[in-house]
Image: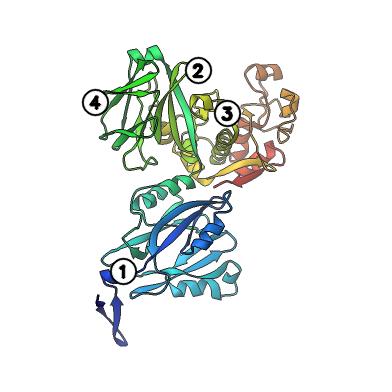
Amino acid sequence: MKKIITFFVLVNFLGVLLLPIASAEEIAVNPSPVYAIWNKKYSYRYLTISETEKNNLLKDTANWKDEGSLWQAYATQKTGTVPVYKIKNKKQNYYYYTISEATKNNLIKSKKSRKTWQYIGIAFYAFDKNQDEVTPIYAVEYSKNKKHFYTSSPGEKNCMLTDSLWTYRGEIFWVPKENANLATDNSTCRLAYGPEISIGLWSYTRSDLKEESFKIDANKDYIIKDKNGDKIAEVLAGTTTRVKYDGDEKLLIYNSIAEKIVDKEVSFEAKDGDNFNIIFDVHRPNSSYNDYRGEIKLKYNNISKEIWVINTLPMEQYTWGMGETTGTGPFEHTKVMTVIFRTYGYWYKEYATKYLKYGFTIRSDSGSQIYRGYEWEKKYPNIKKATEQTKGIIVKYKDEIALTPYSSWSDGRTRSFKEHWGSDDYPWCKSVKDKYGKNSSQSTKQLQDAGNHMVGLIANGSLKLAGSKYKKKYDWILKYYYSKISLQKMY
């Protein structure tokens, strides 16, 4: 086939410049897959067209996750393409991609910036303008360290921008539309918000669910799946689905679809794959908290003979719904509480087995820690704001996730874990003087009778330290009450 090359005219002070635009035939010629590998430790997407480099990185499964090929580009320069430069930020451990030679030179040539930036080379070649048969690559920027995130998916871009710490930076280059991921799959967006955690919201007895059906609807179209993950039906937004217990360990779905009996388990997810932004109303009996983000599942348990309502979503969204505080006090105290809440959830996710037999990781009540979902998130927005400002941070003692007990008041000193509970398993919980959280109006016995074990953080002490008199930051407060801990960003 004969090549077809078209030109457009750019007029400037030097005269007329003819620049080539690639034809549809040329765009399709020999593009290479661009492999995306997610760095779990520093939360960034690494891009390469080298399969060998990809495979070498993926040998380190603890730090890298394969995302496949999200789009294609060119290993050598084609008509209408320009180099995409790869530059490493040595201090923050992430990579920056740009088609601007001027930007590249500004970052790597000055003596000052060379301490931070290292030029790696040309990552691949792409188009510097929109045209037929191409699609944009979007960039969003993290405000705290200027780290960029790159995606061909509008849904994934929008998912990242639900976090106020990310800013849209535009369409930075264009790649062939064919084989580019344009769907709203937000797997990495969810990954950037931490591992998924499953929460047991509440349970029905078999007789409860025989007499009163479970009801659910959503703000978006949703799908219903059986226990094997096979789709049973698609349901329009706002349409109610009901589920009853049908006996013999079976659940009956009806109303919005033809009646169907499923065995033990049924789940509800967003039709477009974007569970990050779907809100399910689960119509909980006698409750003010009915709305939850993410996947909802009903699961029959053979042991307890109950049907559990289970909510699965990323760790950060779980923390947005933290019911342990209203976030209306000093903001640094709210940040303290988000770190404690996330740490506890993270520990349960990694190690706890107590509720796995019921099909979830942690409970939503005081049996674990209180979680109230989307309505609490809306009602108390400072919790989400504090969560965003402590994103991914948990408490650690050496290499161990440090569970962080707390109570409301002390009598002027906290107790060590060993003193109160007789165990050496929590060496970060030592006794410290505590004039900040001391309740002078009650005796030690009265405080203990009211449930104040006085181990770890004292909430009223944290409130005072974060207030206008002392103005202590959240990390200082945590390190005051817990000995020799570190705060580690996990994602």
Tell me how far mark 4 sits from mark 1, CA to CA.
47 Å
Looking at the rendered structure, the kind of residue marked 1 is: Ile
Tell me how far mark 3 sits from mark 4, CA to CA.
37 Å
Tell me how far mark 2 sits from mark 1, CA to CA.
59 Å
Q: Which one is earlier in the sequence, the residue at label 4 or at label 1?
A: 1
Looking at the rendered structure, the kind of residue marked 2 is: Ile
Q: Is residue 438 left or right of residue 61?
A: right
Q: Are marks 2 and 4 in contact (CB under 8 Å)?
A: no
User: Which residue: 52% across, 46% down?
Assistant: 389
Q: Which one is earlier in the sequence, the residue at label 3 or at label 4?
A: 4
Residue marked by disc 3: 353
Residue marked by disc 2: 303
Tell me how far mark 2 sits from mark 3, CA to CA.
15 Å
Q: Which one is earlier in the sequence, the residue at label 2 or at label 3?
A: 2
User: Which residue: 30% across, 71% down?
Assistant: 26
Q: Secondary structure at mark 2?
A: loop
Give the crowd class for mark 3: few <14, some 14-19, many >=20 residues within 10 Å.
Answer: few
Q: Vertical placement of 336 versus 285: above or below?
A: below
